[in-house]
Amino acid sequence: MKDRIHNFSAGPAVLPLAVVEKVRENLVNYEGSGLGVMEMSHRGPLFETIIGEAEACLRRLLQLDNTFAVLFATGGATNQFSMVPMNLLLPGMVGDYIITGTWAEKAYAEAKKFGEVAVAASSEAERFRSIPKEFRLSPRSAYLHFTSNNTIVGSQFRHEPDANGTPLICDASSDFLHKPLAMSRYGLVYAGAQKNLGPAGVTIVIIRRDLLERCPEQLPIMLDYRTYTNHGSLYNTPPTFPIYVTGAVLQWIEALGGLEEMERRNNEKAALLYARLDRSDFYRSVVDPSDRSVMNVTFRIHDHALEDKFLVEAQARGLDGLQGHRSVGGMRASIYNAFPREGVVALIEFMDDFEQRFG
Ligand code: PMP
């Protein structure tokens, strides 16, 4: 078997090796119980402990009090594009959306099906290369929705927008838990696990409990937030394995020092890579410097014709998954929480070498 290589995939993405190794053992025999972790009942005491500890760890990391509920859902972030308006966009009110990329556009388009929506701000005219600094709330705003990190173009909000009393809703799929979050400023945060948190298959939703009063009657059972809050995410069979692995990643974050330490590591990795990009004109970052993502570092080579060669050579050196999203091209290095600093250093060494030969 090949050794593990540097995995720059945007998601599903690299997981901490220590977690993957622990999972491997527990796949066969979970903590000496004699049962494999994928093979146990979601109603049994072992899984109850697994889901309970995952939630408790998340609550400690984010310092969440009981005004918030934590849900483990399925259907990815995309399902939240629908659930948010279905549950929270009351008739007579307006869902406000900040449009900063493809995912925000998709959330907005989905909400349109369920009620009145408005664009609070958009950076589409700049091809999403910046984050809008100002936005407009509707007088009857139901909530303000934004995408904290734009996985495709590689831009990120430095601070959450000030929603001025209207509930702030965040799609944090590609930067959840990359740094401490002031949860008191949010009404709802959701994130598919498969980038910064765990394997594909589970979506974390954190919702301020008072917002549940908005949920209309007669929603399909699995699309109603109250089904999750009333049953501890165990109304039906939840994605037990992804929840287990996510819990293990949360414990890994906590053991390393929590979200402050994640922030320190992530800033360091991103700073190294952006410093390399800015060192010459050979490589170019396309995002406004103040809005660059610390999770998805996108770049081009000034001569686009060299990009295929760059990707082929990178791959041969064990630097995998660097191709940009198919809608924008170029390169994208996804360096989420679990991505090691050594991988960034290896990429920079390769970039230096490639520039020397072709620059
Ligand atoms: N939002 C963002 C910011 C994303 O990056 C993605 C996936 N790349 C999605 C939503 C869609 O997530 P899912 O595939 O879990 O539905």
Image: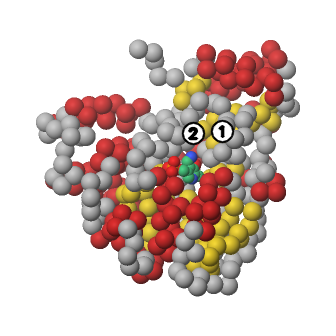
Q: Amino acid at mark 1?
A: His
CB atoms at circles 2 and 1 under 8 Å apart? yes
Measuring from the top left, give residue 261's x and y in whole percent: 51, 48
Q: Is residue 77 above or below residue 143?
A: above
Q: State which quadrant residue 57 falls in.
A: bottom left
Q: Is residue 165 visible?
A: no
Measuring from the top left, give residue 75's x and y in whole percent: 43, 53
Left or right of 152? Residue 260 is left
Q: State which quadrant residue 28 falls in.
A: top left
Residue pictured at 75% horizontal, 53% vertical? 128
Measuring from the top left, give residue 29's x and y in whole percent: 19, 34
Q: Is residue 64 above or below residue 305?
A: below
User: Residue 10 got which mark?
Assistant: 2
Crowding near the residue tagged with mark 1, few <14, some 14–19, many ≥20 C-alpha atoms within 10 Å: some
Q: How many marks?
A: 2
| Disc number lying in front (2 or 1) | 1
User: Residue 249 got which mark?
Assistant: none
Distance Cα–Cα, label 2 vs label 1: 9 Å
For the residue with label 2, is its CB less than 8 Å from the closest atom of ligand 1? yes
What quarter of the picture does the C terminus occupy? Answer: top right
Crowding near the residue tagged with mark 2, few <14, some 14–19, many ≥20 C-alpha atoms within 10 Å: many
Q: Amino acid at mark 2?
A: Ala
Residue pictured at 34% horizontal, 67% vertical? 221
Query: Which residue does the numbered mark 1 point to in the structure image?
Result: 325
Q: Secondary structure at mark 2?
A: loop
Q: Is residue 211 visible?
A: yes
Left or right of 250? Residue 325 is right
